[in-house]
Image (cartoon, grey):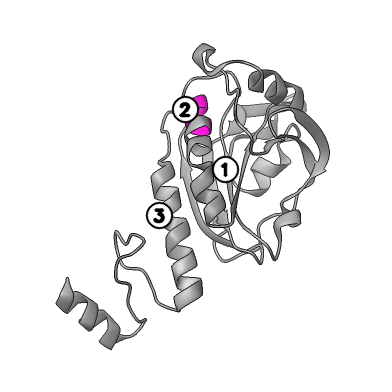
């Protein structure tokens, strides 16, 4: 797995479905540079089981992300047409109707590869033919990207393990607290709690109170 924390998020330009109904070409995260933090997350496949629970969970908290000036963007290796069709399917039938944030189509699998979350790789067999080792879909990768386009946080789950949207919000709050106050956030920190100075004195004072 590629560790991207502290590095610029890989550039891409790809088709996506936005607002749950419009297919656009050349969608890129660069439109948010200098303006917004971005939560960019990968999921394995459309029309599956754990995936819609995550997509709906992010939508349910979308107002909380937007209050913080954070853009949420999803991505899988399915086509934009597949995304669109899944978006027309009601939630009660396993669909993701009602999702409004962008869903990127990584049909070439280059985005998943560059972010280090592609489950599988290409190789050649004994006859020189190109073959795939693995399902060639994305793990459940999630990347928090700051306004300068730098990855500040990443997690990667295996296919059956769903993520916590509350934890993602907590990490967003921690990053924004650090940026705004110059303090560091200790273990299990949540918005509104004490943070601490990045010094031995600051650590000692924090520990003495907790």
Q: Nearer the viewer, mark 3 or mark 1?
A: 3
Image quadrant in which you'd find residue 26:
top right
Residue for point 69% across, 43% down:
111
Confirm whether residue 125 shows in the render. Answer: no
Confirm whether residue 80 shows in the render. Answer: yes
In magenta segment, residue 178: no
User: In the image as oriented, which residue stretches furthest toward the right?
Assistant: 25
Vertical placement of 109 versus 186: above or below?
above
Residue for point 51% across, 30% down:
56
Residue under numbered circle 2: 53
Quadrant where the image shows the C terminus: bottom left
Q: Residue 7: x, y in percent?
A: 61, 64
Image quadrant in which you'd find residue 27:
top right
Residue under numbered circle 1: 41
How many C-alpha atoms fall within 10 Å of the one at disc 3: few (<14), some, or many (≥20)? some
In front here: 19 or 72?
19
Image quadrant in which you'd find residue 125:
top right
How many C-alpha atoms fall within 10 Å of the one at disc 2: few (<14), some, or many (≥20)? some
């Amino acid at each position: 797995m590629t560790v991207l924390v502290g590095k610029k998020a890989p550039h891409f330009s790809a088709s996506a479905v936005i607002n749950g109904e419009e297919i656009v070409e050349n969608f890129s995260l660069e439109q948010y540079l200098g303006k917004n933090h971005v939560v960019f997350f990968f999921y394995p496949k459309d029309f599956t089981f754990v995936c819609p629970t995550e997509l709906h969970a992010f939508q349910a908290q979308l107002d909380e992300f937007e209050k913080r000036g954070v853009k949420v963007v999803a991505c899988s290796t399915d086509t934009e047409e597949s995304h669109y069709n899944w978006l027309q399917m009601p939630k009660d039938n396993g669909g993701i109707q009602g999702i409004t944030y962008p869903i990127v189509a990584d049909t070439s699998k280059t985005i998943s590869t560059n972010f280090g979350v592609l489950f599988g790789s290409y190789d050649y067999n004994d006859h020189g033919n190109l073959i795939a080792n693995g399902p060639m879909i994305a793990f459940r990768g999630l990347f928090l990207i700051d306004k300068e386009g730098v990855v500040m946080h990443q997690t990667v789950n295996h296919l059956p393990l769903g993520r916590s949207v509350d934890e993602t919000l907590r990490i967003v709050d921690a990053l924004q607290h650090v940026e705004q106050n110059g303090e560091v956030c200790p273990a299990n920190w949540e918005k509104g709690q004490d943070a601490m100075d990045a010094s031995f004195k600051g650590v000692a004072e924090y520990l003495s109170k907790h």
